[in-house]
């Protein structure tokens, strides 16, 4: 069996230490990403539920998607007033940083 001299022990110790530390850093980054994804899911659910709670918006199929706090609304509604109402509802949800309106009105293709 080979014996390690002082410098070789140091190198082995250094490599082992970095092997233990680096995966920890990676998992922290993954954790933050997972937490951000979870927060986006919560925001999406709250916006969708709030839109469904508004009787005048219930008949419409308004899609909600959230990425990094930016809420995207899409689908067809009857009027610009309906769009504005859905946007106002989304703005009231905690964690919403930005609203992207991709909704259209029937027959006009308005955004």
Image (cartoon, grey):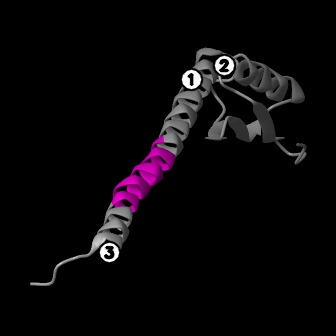
Name the residue furthest left: 1
Residue drawn at x 61%, y 19% is 50
Identify residue for label 3.
Answer: 8
Closer to the chain start, of discs 2 and 3, is: 3
Q: Can you say whether 4 is above or below 79 in the image? A: below
Q: Do the residues labelled 3 and 1 touch (CB within 8 Å)?
A: no
Instruction: Report the disc number at residue 98.
Output: none
Q: Can you say whether 96 is above or below 61 in the image? A: above
What residue range appears in magenta? 17-31
Residue drawn at x 74%, y 25% is 86
Closer to the chain start, of discs 2 and 1, is: 1
Is residue 105 in sight in this rendering? no
Say which element carries label 3. helix
Q: In this view, does 37 lie to the left or right of 68?
A: left
Q: Where is residue 99 in the image (x, y as percent from the top left)?
A: 78, 33
Q: Can you say whether 47 is above or below 105 in the image? A: above
Identify residue for label 1.
Answer: 46
Q: How many marks?
A: 3
Quarter of the C terminus within the rendering? top right
Identify residue for label 2.
Answer: 93
Q: Position of residue 15 (x, y in %)?
A: 37, 67
**Which residue is more in the foreground, 32 or 23?**
23
To which quarter of the image does residue 19 belong? bottom left
Residue drawn at x 38%, y 63% is 14
Closer to the chain start, of discs 3 and 1, is: 3
Residue drawn at x 74%, y 40% is 76
Q: How crowded is mark 3: few (under 14 residues within 10 Å), some or many (20 or more)?
A: few
């Amino acid at each position: 069996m080979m014996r390690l001299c002082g410098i070789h022990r140091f190198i082995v110790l250094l490599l082992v230490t970095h092997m233990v530390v680096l995966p920890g850093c990676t998992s922290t980054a993954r954790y933050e990403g997972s937490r951000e994804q979870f927060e986006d899911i919560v925001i999406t659910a709250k916006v969708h539920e709030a839109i469904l709670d508004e009787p005048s918006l219930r008949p419409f199929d308004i899609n909600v998607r959230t990425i990094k706090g930016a809420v995207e609304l899409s689908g067809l509604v009857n009027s610009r007033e309906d769009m504005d109402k859905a946007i106002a509802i989304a703005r009231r949800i905690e964690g919403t940083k930005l609203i992207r309106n991709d909704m259209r009105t029937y027959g006009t293709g308005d955004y």
